[in-house]
Amino acid sequence: MTSHLLTLLLSLIAVVLPLRYGCTEIIGGHVVSPHSWPYMAAIQRKNLTVCGGALVEGQWVLTAAHCQLNEPEVRVVLGAHQASVAEKEQQIFKVMRYFPHPQFDKSSKENDIMLLKLKGIAKQNKYVQTLSLPDTYEDTKPGTKCKVAGWGVTSSGKPSKYLQETTLKIVDRKSCKSKYEKYTKITSNMLCALGKKYSKRDACKGDSGGPLICADRYSGIVSFGRGCGRSGMPGVYTRLTEKYIVWIKKLISLHRDP
Ligand code: 4AZ
């Protein structure tokens, strides 16, 4: 009898453990089909990906303001699958200039959005393409299915060699606010997203700046979170509001090369 119970218990553990801890991904995601995110940018310091971003125009990458690294050795890798290794599809650029949002607040993370002007214009092809900015400004509704990608920390605690993606759902701002009550203010310029129950899906360290795509629309930018993949704790994204889209378009047209 006891041996039967023991067997049952062990089988249960064998089934449940891989479900909860078996993912070696963004957090709870999987390696993407190579070059299926052709607008994805890796922002690197000394071959290590510190942030993600999205190519929004030939010479412009949109990322998070907290990704600002005023260092000469920073490079932006486009067309990558394995971002830290030279691949024939890659196009690599230095940063000509950083344009963090003028109202970015480091401690509250409000306005966590930044444009990078690259030293050179990306050649668009099968592997390198721009991501269109949203052309409508309504809020993304709770329950909307989204995807996020990055080379950031996986459940192993280390960054991923290959680009990883995972799927999430938008959480209503009220419940997100209550989850973050003790830590910071969740504003209408932010979106919160969470994986399926028990899936531990999330963005993590190193995924910041990467695009959140909801119902095929560029909707947000990986910004912050209380830990990664904690159950019930959503990740927080900068929402691509009308105010930000207007700022992006103005800034690009003002600083575009002739
Ligand atoms: C980070 O440190 C970070 N779980 C990004 C996203 C999240 C947590 C941390 C969300 O860049």
Image (cartoon, rainbow, N blue to C red):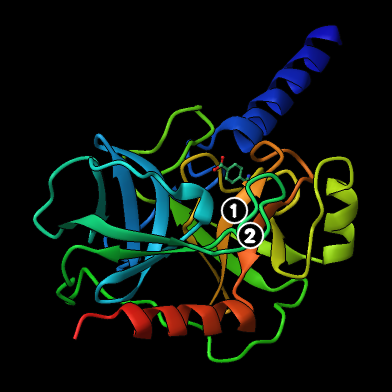
- Image coords of residue 44 (percent x, y): 30, 43
What kind of element bears circle 1?
strand
**Nearer to the camera, 18 or 226:** 226
Ligand 1 quadrant assignment: top right
Q: Quadrant of the N terminus?
A: top right
Residue at 46% x, 42% y is 206
Name the amino acid type tagged 2: Tyr
Q: Residues within 10 Å of mark 2 (few under 14, many from 20)?
A: many
**Nearer to the camera, 63 or 200:** 63
Which disc number belongs to residue 223? 1
- Indicate left or right for 85 with 130 as reference: left
Disc 1 Cβ-to-ligand 1 distance below 8 Å: yes
- Indicate left or right for 162 with 193 as reference: left
- Image coords of residue 30 (percent x, y): 45, 49
Residue that numbered label 2 is attached to: 237
Which disc number belongs to residue 77? none
- Image coords of residue 122 (percent x, y): 18, 71
What kind of element bears circle 2?
strand
Q: Quadrant of the C terminus?
A: bottom left
The residues bearing labels 2 and 1 have C-alpha atoms spaced at a distance of 5 Å
Quadrant housing residue 73: top left
Residue at 70% x, 64% y is 190
Residue at 83% x, 47% y is 180
Quadrant housing residue 142: bottom right
Whether pointer 2 and pointer 1 mark residues with C-beta atoms closer than 8 Å, the reply is yes
Name the amino acid type tagged 1: Ser
Q: Residues within 10 Å of mark 1 (few under 14, many from 20)?
A: many
State which tag comes first along the sequence, 2 or 1.
1
Q: Is residue 80 visible?
A: no
Q: Is residue 93 above or below residue 200?
A: below
User: Residue lying furthest left in this view?
Assistant: 88
